[in-house]
């Protein structure tokens, strides 16, 4: 009987190690320093197969235009570093609800690296309201995984990550009006 907690603990440790390994292997560009051309974490694509800086910059500019048009005042861009990398902040809430029905919201913070969209952006959740820590971690894991999948295709992804976040918030929303009635 005394071995059972150890087995459970070992299973939990293995699960946590797998999760940790997944996060350690996420392709991100946290630094503005020049990356090693032999870096094997970029994606399955060879660096020589990536479009040039000018093409990537144009791709990012096009996506930024779409983000500004779609999310208007909920979208904010801040300069990110010496490589012209940008950080996007998008205020996200469940879609198609009236303001008084919204019980959860957050700011999706997305830092694009110089090889975006072939390298997943660094993603953080800021100003989270209405989600517990477990839900917050689950959402972050889900959108990071989606970002990795899209980066392997070289697909721009910020709009899709926002939509994924909206869907998650909608499925986890607790209508404040209903909570006040039951209290």
Image: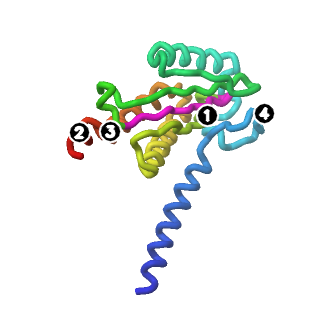
Tag 3: Cα neighbours inside 10 Å, few (<14), some, or many (≥20)? Answer: some
- Decide which of tag 1 and tag 2 comes sooner along the chain: 1
- Decide which of tag 3 and tag 2 comes sooner along the chain: 3
Tag 2: Cα neighbours inside 10 Å, few (<14), some, or many (≥20)? Answer: few
| Quadrant in the rendering for residue 85 | top right
Residue 99 position, x and y percent, is 33, 26
Report the side of 16 relative to 85 (left or right).
left
Residue 114 position, x and y percent, is 68, 28
- SS at circle 4: loop
What residue is shown with label 2? 178
Range of the magenta residues? 104-115
Q: Are marks 1 and 4 in contact (CB under 8 Å)?
A: no
Residue 173 position, x and y percent, is 32, 39
Tag 4: Cα neighbours inside 10 Å, few (<14), some, or many (≥20)? Answer: few
Residue 173 bears which disc, if any?
Answer: 3
Residue found at x 59% / y 34%: 121
Above or below: residue 13 compared with residue 70: below
What residue is shown with label 1? 119
């Amino acid at each position: 009987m005394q071995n059972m907690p150890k087995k459970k603990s070992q299973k939990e440790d293995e699960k946590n190690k797998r999760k940790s390994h997944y996060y350690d292997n996420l392709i991100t560009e946290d630094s503005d320093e020049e990356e090693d051309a032999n870096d094997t974490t970029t994606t399955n694509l060879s660096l020589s197969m990536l479009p040039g800086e000018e093409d990537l910059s144009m791709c990012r500019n096009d996506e930024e235009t779409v983000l500004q048009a779609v999310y208007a005042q909920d979208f904010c861009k801040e300069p990110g570093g010496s490589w012209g990398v940008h950080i996007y902040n998008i205020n996200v809430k469940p879609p198609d609800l009236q303001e008084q029905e919204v019980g959860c919201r957050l700011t999706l913070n997305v830092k694009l690296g110089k090889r975006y969209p072939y390298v997943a952006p660094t993603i953080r959740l800021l100003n989270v309201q209405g989600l517990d820590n477990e839900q917050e971690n689950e959402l972050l894991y889900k959108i990071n995984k989606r970002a990795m999948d899209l980066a392997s295709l070289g697909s721009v992804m910020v709009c899709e990550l926002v939509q994924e976040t909206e869907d998650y918030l909608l499925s986890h929303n607790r209508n404040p009006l209903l909570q006040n009635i039951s209290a």
